[in-house]
Image (cartoon, helix red, strand yellow):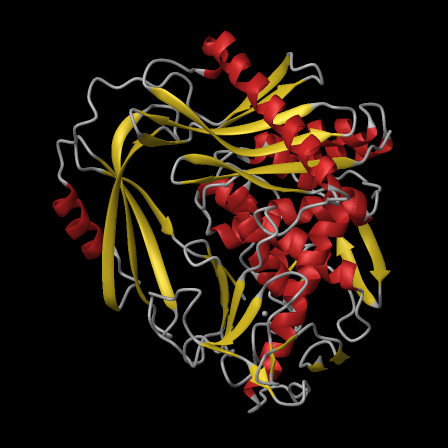
């Protein structure tokens, strides 16, 4: 049986636990205090359970727990997500979720790769200076203004804890866009462990470019002008003026202002710089509202905070990206020939979802977990489009079809782009994360609509199965609810495709029951993409 979920979040800043906003309406100060008390009690019980069952969680001497998120189900079941440090160092792959009953007793756990964490020494044999220099040398994609910042960590993402340097290199890409890479190096041997992109990239009232004439929430300023500051959700939209620096901050750029509160000209490849801003501003609001009204999530980090949105980043930059460091979205102007500004509904939803993933499961942007990270943004970004139900940008299963016509990726048969995987295999984890995501995108389509040929909202689809089976869909609202719960309650930073199957089945059982058609469809769709 379906049951409503109430999400309560805890934010971590500088290692100190702070209280985030609840996903419930704050009807009164008394309600707020009561909800905070429930959250605090859940955390207290979770800490006690970790201590009491230290072997289960691999918790021992030198470790400290840091609360990242708390989810309370309607029946009182609690899910407390922890990250941990060892002797003051972050443990990558050491995150876990404590699942407990309403009375605080332990119900189970979901761990990332790390179990026991114990090192003979936290003194690196390889120094920070040499590591930083090596990372700069290896960063082929950073063409200029590159700077590196090494951080000592405990690397446990592969299940074997060891001391490592995590070095972030920030610079400028070949199209003037901010670009970064992260290099992980063994701090004892100096050997490279892995590297991955630091950003989460994708392909983005007034008179908008993609969604027609729309209402837009603005702020009237003291001087009588209007500004693209959303007074309801808190996000602001700025012109980056083709900024090509990797040091983009929320304070960069220029806030869009206007004298009559009429924005843009509604044209593609518009010379009116406010046109892209209209789409960006409105579609950010649609994404915020989708998460809040569908899942009770109050903003990307569930703390009510609005993001900064930049349009006109780089020169002919045909892409968009989310950045945790500035808590902002950056969108380019397209290639200037076939692809216009990257500010359409599903692209904006995709980018904000990278922030949601970072704030919850924090799926590592590498290997199979990286494919799941990208798929999460594709799936929930597409659901923003279905939520908005705009008659100009009709909901579909074609990702970025407006800004990258005819589409960048599609769900019914991902391999039609010539690169994405329809089915899981041992080689999927070696693909670029934008292509390994195809397996999960295919799962989502099959779980939503089922297999075979059909037409949805005027678009023809024909989804095959990898095992020759016939799958009956449960609708994308149920499929996405299962995915969101799996992401926020069961997935961890190192979840792979097999783990995603387990996580979504747990979520389906929670939401609809183990004997439900929804549970069966979830399993059948995974088997249909060769994940068993």
**Which of the pair 132/278 is nearer the observer?**
278
Residue displayed at 31% across by 63% down: 141
- The image shows residue 49 at horizontal and vertical percentages of 55, 13
Is 347 located above or below residue 161 in the figure? below
Task: Identify the residue at horizontal 82%, vertical 55% (top origin).
Answer: 453
Q: Position of residue 386 (x, y in %)?
A: 77, 59
Residue 240: quarter of image: bottom left
Against 116, residue 206 (above or below) is below
Q: Is residue 451 visible?
A: no
Name the image quarter holding residue 205: bottom right
Residue drawn at point x = 38 percent, y = 75 percent: 175
Q: On the rendered structure, is 194 left or right of 31?
A: left
Left or right, residue 223 beside residue 189: right
Q: Residue at x 43, y 15 (%)?
A: 58
| Horizontal side of residue 314 vs 165, given as left or right | right
The percent coordinates of residue 518 (x first, y second) are: 82, 34
User: Which of the two residues, 466 or 104, is positioned nearer the viewer here?
Assistant: 104
| Nearer the observer, 146 or 51 | 51
399 or 61: nearer the viewer: 61
Please state, as top left, top right, bottom left or bottom right, where the N terminus lies in the image: top right
């Amino acid at each position: 049986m379906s049951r409503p979920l109430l999400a309560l979040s805890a934010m971590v800043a500088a290692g100190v636990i702070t209280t985030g906003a609840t996903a419930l309406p704050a009807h009164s100060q008394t309600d707020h205090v009561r909800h905070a008390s429930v959250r605090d009690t859940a955390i207290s019980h979770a800490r006690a359970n970790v201590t009491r069952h230290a072997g289960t969680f691999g918790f021992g001497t030198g470790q400290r727990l840091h609360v990242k998120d708390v989810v309370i189900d309607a029946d009182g079941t609690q899910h407390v997500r922890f990250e941990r440090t060892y002797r003051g160092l972050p443990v990558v792959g050491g995150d876990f979720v404590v699942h407990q009953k309403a009375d605080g007793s332990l119900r189970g756990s979901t761990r990332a790769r790390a179990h026991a964490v114990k090192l003979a020494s936290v003194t690196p044999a390889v120094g920070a200076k040499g590591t930083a220099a090596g990372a700069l040398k290896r960063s082929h994609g950073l063409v200029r203004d590159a700077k590196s910042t090494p951080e000592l960590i405990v690397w446990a993402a592969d299940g074997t804890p060891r001391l490592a340097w995590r070095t972030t290199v920030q610079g400028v890409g070949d199209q003037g866009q901010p670009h970064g890479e992260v290099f992980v190096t063994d701090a004892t041997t100096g050997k490279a462990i892995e590297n991955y992109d630091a950003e989460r990239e994708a392909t983005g009232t007034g008179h908008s470019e993609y969604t027609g004439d729309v209402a837009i929430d603005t702020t009237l300023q003291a001087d009588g002008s209007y500004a693209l500051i959303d007074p309801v959700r808190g996000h602001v939209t700025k012109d980056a003026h083709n900024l090509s620096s990797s040091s983009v901050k929320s304070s960069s750029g220029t806030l869009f202002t206007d004298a009559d509160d009429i924005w843009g000209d509604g044209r593609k490849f518009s010379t009116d710089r406010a046109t892209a801003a209209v789409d960006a501003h409105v579609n950010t609001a649609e994404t915020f509202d989708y998460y809040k009204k569908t899942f009770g999530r109050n903003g990307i980090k569930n703390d009510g905070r609005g993001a900064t949105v930049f349009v006109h980043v780089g020169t002919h930059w045909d892409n968009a990206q989310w950045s945790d460091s500035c808590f902002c979205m950056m969108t380019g102007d397209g290639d200037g020939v076939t692809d216009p500004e990257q500010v359409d509904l599903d692209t904006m939803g995709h980018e904000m979802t990278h922030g949601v993933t970072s704030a919850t499961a924090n799926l590592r942007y590498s290997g199979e977990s990286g494919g799941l990270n990208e798929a999460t943004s594709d799936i929930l970004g597409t659901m923003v489009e279905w939520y908005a139900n705009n008659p100009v940008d009709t909901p579909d299963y074609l990702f970025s079809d407006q800004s990258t016509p005819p589409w960048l990726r599609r769900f019914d048969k991902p391999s039609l782009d010539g690169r994405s995987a329809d089915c899981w295999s041992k080689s999927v984890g070696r693909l670029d994360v934008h292509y390994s995501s195809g397996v999960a995108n295919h799962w989502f389509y099959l779980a939503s609509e089922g297999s075979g040929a059909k037409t949805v909202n005027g678009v023809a689809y024909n989804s095959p199965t990898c095992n020759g089976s016939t799958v009956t869909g449960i609708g994308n609202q149920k499929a996405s609810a299962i995915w969101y719960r799996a992401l926020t309650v069961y997935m961890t930073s190192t979840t792979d495709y097999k783990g995603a199957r387990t996580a979504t089945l747990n979520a389906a059982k929670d939401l609809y029951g183990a004997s439900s058609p929804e549970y069966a469809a979830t399993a059948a769709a995974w088997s249909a993409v060769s994940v068993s």
